[in-house]
Image (cartoon, rainbow, N blue to C red):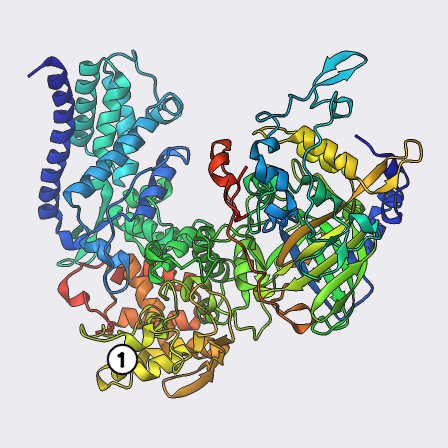
Amino acid sequence: MSSPHHNGMTAHRRCSTSVVAGAALVVPMLLTGASASAETRGYVISWFATATNNPEFAINCPRAVKDPASRYATTGKRRVDRAFVDGVEVSAYDYPDALETDPDIETVTGPHAYGFDLGGPEANKFTDPETGEKVDNQLWRAVGCTTNFQFTPPAMPYMEGQAWNSGYADAAPAWAIQISGPDLNKDGPVTVTLDRTLDHLLRDALGGIRSEVTYVIDPSPRSHNVLEGEIKNGVLYVKGGSLWLQGSAPFYTQIDLENAHMRIRSTPGGKLVGHWGGYTDWRKWAYMYTSRCGGGFDCIGIYRSVQKLADADPDPVTGKNRLISTTWRMEAVPAYLASPDGTVLASATADGLGGRIHPPPAVASTVAFDTPGSIEESATETAPTTSSQ
Amino acid sequence: MNTTHSRRLSRLSAGAIAVLGMAALWNASAADTDMATSVRLSPSQYRLTIADIFGTSVRVDGRFEPETRDQGLLAIGARTGNFTDSGLETYDTIARAVASQVLDEHHRAELLGCKPRADTSSDDECARKFFSRVGTLLYRRPLSDAEVQTRVAMAGAEAERLHDFYAGVRLSLAQMLISPQFLFRFKRMEPDPQRPGQERMNAYDRASAISFFLWGTTPDLELLRAAGSGELHTKQGLERQVNRMIASPRVAAAVHAFFADMLQFTEFDAVSKDPEFFPRYTASVKEQAQEQTLRTIVDHVVTRRGDYRDLFTTPHTYLTKDLAALYSVPLVDVRASGQLQRWLPYTYPADDPRIGILSHASFTTLWSPSGRTSPTIRGKALRQNILCQRVPPPPGNVSFQFVDDTSNPQYKTTRDRLTAHSSSPMCAGCHKVTDPLGLALENFDSAGGFRMSENSAVIDVSGEINGKKFDGPVGLARAIRDDPAVTSCVAQRIFAFETGYMPPRDDPQWVEIQKKFAESRYDVLELMRQVALSDLSYGSSGSKLMTAVND
């Protein structure tokens, strides 16, 4: 599924074909990314998933509270999804654009979601529960009532968590972050460089991601991103820029953001916790979720909901939006980062950004995924941390 | 008794009788050969021996009888090692598994060395060829005609009973593998024709002693040839073989085994760390920590032929990604992900706290409880294992109230807690000996990570040895390096590793060995060479030689 949008590639990707021939000369330059700085700290992403906001489930999804079965594709009152192409019935999973009837799943109506102000219409905005700002996050609006997303950190949305913990973290190349600046123990301008590595993450004795491991940066310029940011009151902000990171199947095959924003802080041990947001290609995101449908998850409903709520970059021919505002939650642990020639580019440190360590974010109890059989009992509960279906 | 049961019983009987028979033979062997001069093969020696005789594709699976540590070494404990009933059973299990592999379809063509006339019956000629050849290697001496005939007869009887030639050889081979002649090496004395009235160790036992000392395995054919020809009883012949073996890369295995014993790495079986406090201490780190130190030692002692004392100050080591993360240092390996972690050389800056083997996780984690450090235990290990200085055990009624209370706001650091604990006169005497050494390593937590503070209090890492003050792990490393007990201790231990007993303190030969060790700038391989060439290694284990130097 290619998107016409990516034919008008942004600068760092447009140059990728030209650097191939001269990779040996260009690579070291690209890998340093940032201009010479007094300090560069290294991290690798240790947790990455769609940012959820489930403590307000009853407010977000009143229809689901009244009729929990409505959230299942294969039970309850919704008809089986059917699709037709040229009058011939086809699999709705293969042709979700050819559905006979829009599943019209419930979307989030509550006022809060994590995110960033991307300049979208006021009518679509949420209020960020952390900052109180008006933010764009149509992806959360589209999927926030579905069963798959009734999870609260440290638990990930179900499919993302399955992929991360059953192979991704232990087999896929890690994503690396370098933060460079004159003095990272003070507020001030910084450069944020993101790359893919040649190594997968290593686990510690608790099953978490081990810190202070050394990773080698993948020299391919495809996943090399340099963004400008600022540390203010000990929080790192990025406000604008393009980001593209190659991933792995099944989640995330790529991280693709336009108008990329970040808000990240240091917690004990030097771990970073925060959010990334921006506009992402809705079709690629939906493909990620709906191409491996199963377990009663509403893949078709999610696909159509995301498609409908896409809110940026209209296609010049069809007029339909190709991008959707989204926010991800991330964590990263300190890591040494090196180039393939052995040069250590970034050091691991437990020091906080801007010289500040923020308390670890309050974590609600982990939401366990209940089977459909528990719908009736849990539907009467108002506590949204249960995974009532 | 029904038929099935009787068949099972007959199979059990054959095995049980064989085992019991072996036990009886052992007692007889012990009476004949004097148990004080027999040394049980260690698990490492057993494995290397099987690999050398039958190839590395023959696996040794199973649990060995636990070894006994005596005077700091398992090698000394092996001198008095015997078997319990259950230990004999485990060795029988291992032996049968090895024999099965040797005679299986994958191995028999190569290892048997002959093809029987028929697979379904006995073939004494083929069996005799096999047992004559293999028997020499297993028993580390040529078998007598009677011994070969015993093996052939057992193989033949079993082959006829089961209509399977290979089953017969398999059983007879398994019996050899639980014979004391295989599981023990002996020091059998014979009259010395060069010195009437005196005794000498017989040549084949001498070959065993040399080989297990210098290569950690059974004698090779060249060494057995030298034994058979009488060369090992001559100064030149002995020197030629010892020099050959010292020059071989195989000497690294013996150095590896010796230091694993001296540093008591078998104690790692009992090490565990609380993952809530030490998430970076994974199972792989626990294994790799030992290998890091042994690789560092082999590199320094064998490859570089360095001064033994410099092991305590060397900035050179080998790390994996896991260990590098534990030590918070970058280690760049540009190989693609998914492959096994490699050992890569790493060099610390000259004054880095991590110089020397005392800073390795193999020392700092092995000698720490699971949730906190113990300068006392670390200091004691240093005194006993590195300096050969005995530290008495604590009294039975000691209270650990202060040292275990790691969250006491009044005693924030381990030093504070130990000071409170050892204020009691009952405790002070021993703590004066151990704690000044162990406290210098307090920058290393129980899992080997580096820290500057404990409970928000800065850690004081000053220490003292023999009245000489020093500061921190680098100061300790240099003080230990310069302590004369370091070299005398390793010399004693190497001698004991070879002979099974501590060297006689005032014997002129022993004094000469230490002198040559010093003249060689404390070259451990030269020390091993001198020990292997010395008559002290092949003398009688009479009581006048069995003196513990550190009494």
The image shows residue B534, relative to residue A302, as above or below, that is: below
Pointer 1: residues within 10 angstroms few (<14), some, or many (20+)?
some
* Residue at 15% from the left image edge and 61% from the top image edge: B542
Residue B69 in sight from this viewpoint: yes
Left or right placement of residue A8 versus residue B195 in this view:
right
Which type of secondary structure does the marked residue at label 1 adopt?
Answer: helix
Residue under label 1:
B430
Quadrant in the picture for the N terminus of chain A: top right
Q: In which quarter of the image is the C terminus of chain A?
A: top right
Q: Is residue B306 left or right of residue B139?
A: right
Where is residue B336 drawn, in percent x and y? 65, 44
Residue at x-position 23% and y-position 72%: B393
Residue B189 point in image, percent of width and height: 17, 52
- Residue extending farthest to the right is A316
**Which chain is indicated by disc 1?**
B
Q: In which quarter of the image is residue B7?
A: top left
Q: Callout 1, which amino acid?
A: Cys
Q: Residue at x 34, y 54 (%)?
A: B269
Between A105 and B531, which is closer to the camera in this rendering?
A105
